[in-house]
Image (tube, rainbow, N blue to C red):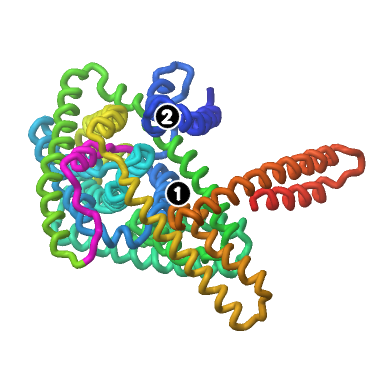
């Protein structure tokens, strides 16, 4: 098996793992990691040869962009305090604790190298958190905080990692320079993200065609990441800012085809890239195995100790952080369900899985220092990092569904249904207002006006049938039954038409382009 065949196996696994995961109740990323581990143990499967410095630029931009599309700037703003406590403060605390313990237990490990180890295992993976939380039906507020933590903690961790690596390679360290690097990295990333977001938004207006617009959205995250990194900024933060900008402003209310096609396109990209990313994590297991050859007991002990530090520090940090968040929430003058119960705190603690970023940072550790000497204890750092990744991703990923079910942490369906009803009422009222505006300038027949008024009401009822009175709901249900019958018959008619047109494609002299154009017309009719 060569590298290309291995890539196809991972892509196929990414597709198959979704329905399999749904059936067995396990997140698809965990299944892909297990698949990667199995493949790594097979002799005929080649070792992966992806340059470490390309893993983050290739995988993170589309994954981050896809994750941001599911949220909004308003959610980040509402949860800024808990996100800050987790994405920034907890990363710092975890880095310090891991560095202190690793420096103490690993003989001869310099402090700068220990800090690099702490930084690369500190951030929970944004892709794992988003994928797992999205499949378990967790409360929306909890998912928002997990997504925010996962998206922003890489920014802090990667900057800390680069500072520590620079200190280990050069042998010098300046706290002031490190702080200035962190600040400049954030400023550059914000500037690049906003500039590219604004420019991409204007370019999308000029392109007009949905196919071209969606193609542009695939290029923009990569451009944002690479440009920010070239200017010594945070590529991760730049992608987040660009994605948030485009999520707010890029698609208008009437850009129906762009929105529908874009949603489908990014679901596919997210599924495939996520599968490949977590498959690579399992495939890189051979590096850890080779590193520990002859020293298994000693190195497994170090890895287990660091895993314990990472897990315990997260638990101990969440307790006061949750209390502090509740105190801050009590002083707010608006209702936002940020406070979490102890059950949600436990779920959030156990959701701290490490993944793609940690693997890429571990593999990107230089082989030598500026003096030409080998990077201190590089093999030990890589092994410990893989131990943390495998323990948190596989162990926590496999047991998180059971824990969620055991604690009964589920989305508030009644609240979501009530909010859906409110949106349905607002949509119906907006349609009625527009009808009155049209009636003010156009002379509509009375029967047409009444028909349009009923249509305006039905816009809301179709979204939320509970918004109407009982008589209207019953009338709507009767119309709905009739409509379903009409649509069923119409679907069969359109199906017969499509079969006939498609059969004409293979007839002598038939123009495939004309046949496809007619088929697209029939397909669009089928969506109505």
* Circle number at residue 21: 2
Residue at the (74%, 52%) spot, across then down? 521
Task: Identify the residue shown where x is 42% and y is 58%.
Answer: 243
Question: Going by the picture, which residue comes out furthest to the bottom?
Answer: 441
| Marker count (numbered) | 2
Residue 412, compared with residue 5, is above or below; it is: below
Q: Nearer the viewer, residue 61 or 366?
A: 61
Q: Is residue 340 magenta?
A: yes
Is 431 left or right of 382, judged from the image as shown?
A: right
Badge 2 element? helix
Q: Earlier in the sequence, mark 2 or mark 1?
A: 2
Classify residue 433 as left or right of residue 507.
left
Residues in magenta? 334-356
Q: In this view of the protein, which residue sits in the foreground, 131 or 444?
A: 444
Q: Is residue 175 above or below residue 313?
A: below
Residue 167 appears anywhere in the view: no
Look at discs 2 and 1 and give the one toward the viewer.
2
**Residue 45: % across, % down:** 47, 21
Magenta stretch holds residue 230: no
| 441 in relation to 281, above or below | below
Q: Which residue is label 1 attached to?
A: 62
Residue 525 is labelled as: none
Q: Position of residue 240 (x, y in %)?
A: 37, 57
Disc 1 element: helix
Say which residue appears at 18% left-offset and 18% top-offset: 297
Percent across and percent down for residue 290 are: 31, 22
Can you give x and y, in whole percent of width and height, for residue 364 in the image? 32, 41
Residue drawn at point x = 78 percent, y = 50 percent: 518
Of residue 392 and residue 433, the one placed in the foreground of this image is: 433
């Amino acid at each position: 098996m060569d590298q290309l065949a291995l890539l196809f196996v991972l892509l196929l696994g990414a597709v198959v793992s979704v329905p399999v995961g749904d059936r067995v109740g396990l997140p698809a990323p965990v299944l892909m990691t297990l698949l990667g581990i199995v493949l790594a143990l097979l002799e005929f499967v080649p070792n992966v040869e992806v340059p470490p410095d390309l893993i983050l630029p290739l995988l993170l931009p589309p994954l981050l962009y896809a994750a941001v599309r599911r949220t909004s700037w308003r959610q980040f703003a509402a949860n800024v305090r808990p996100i800050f406590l987790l994405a920034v403060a907890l990363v710092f605390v975890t880095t310090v604790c891991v560095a202190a313990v690793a420096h103490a237990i690993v003989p001869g490990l310099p402090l700068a190298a220990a800090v690099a180890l702490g930084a690369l295992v500190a951030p929970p993976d944004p892709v794992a958190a988003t994928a797992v939380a999205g499949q378990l039906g967790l409360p929306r507020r909890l998912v928002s905080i997990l997504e925010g933590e996962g998206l922003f903690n890489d920014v802090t961790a990667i900057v800390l990692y680069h500072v520590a690596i620079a200190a280990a390679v050069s042998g010098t360290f300046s706290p002031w320079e490190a702080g200035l690097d962190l600040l400049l990295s954030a400023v550059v990333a914000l500037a690049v993200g906003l500039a590219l977001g604004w420019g991409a938004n204007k370019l999308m207006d000029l392109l007009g065609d949905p196919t071209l617009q969606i193609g542009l959205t695939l290029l923009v995250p990569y451009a944002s990441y690479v440009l920010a990194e070239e200017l010594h900024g945070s590529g991760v933060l730049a992608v987040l800012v660009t994605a948030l900008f485009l999520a707010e402003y890029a698609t208008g209310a009437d850009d129906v085809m762009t929105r529908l096609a874009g949603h489908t396109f990014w679901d596919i990209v997210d599924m495939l890239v996520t599968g490949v990313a977590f498959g690579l994590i399992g495939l890189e297991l051979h590096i850890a195995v080779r590193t520990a050859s002859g020293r298994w007991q000693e190195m497994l002990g170090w890895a287990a100790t660091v895993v314990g530090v990472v897990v315990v520090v997260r638990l101990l940090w969440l307790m006061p952080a949750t209390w502090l968040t509740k105190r801050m929430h009590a002083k707010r003058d608006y209702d936002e369900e940020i406070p979490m119960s102890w059950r949600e705190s436990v779920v959030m603690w156990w959701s701290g899985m490490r993944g793609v970023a940690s693997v890429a940072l571990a593999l990107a550790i230089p082989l030598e220092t500026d003096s030409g000497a080998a990077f201190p204890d590089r093999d030990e750092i890589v092994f410990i990092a893989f131990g943390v990744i495998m323990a948190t991703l596989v162990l926590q990923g496999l047991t998180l569904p059971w824990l969620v079910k055991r604690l009964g942490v589920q989305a508030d369906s009644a609240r979501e249904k009530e909010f859906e009803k409110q949106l349905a009422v607002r949509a119906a009222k907006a349609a009625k207002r527009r009808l009155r505006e049209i009636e003010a300038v156009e002379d509509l027949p009375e029967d047409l006006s009444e028909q349009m008024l009923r249509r305006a009401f039905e816009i809301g009822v179709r979204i939320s049938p509970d918004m109407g009175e009982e008589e209207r709901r019953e009338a709507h249900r009767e119309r709905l039954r009739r409509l379903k019958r009409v649509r069923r018959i119409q679907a069969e008619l359109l199906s017969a038409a499509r079969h006939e047109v498609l059969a004409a494609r293979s007839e002598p002299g038939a123009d495939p382009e004309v046949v496809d154009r007619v088929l697209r017309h029939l397909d669009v009719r089928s969506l109505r």
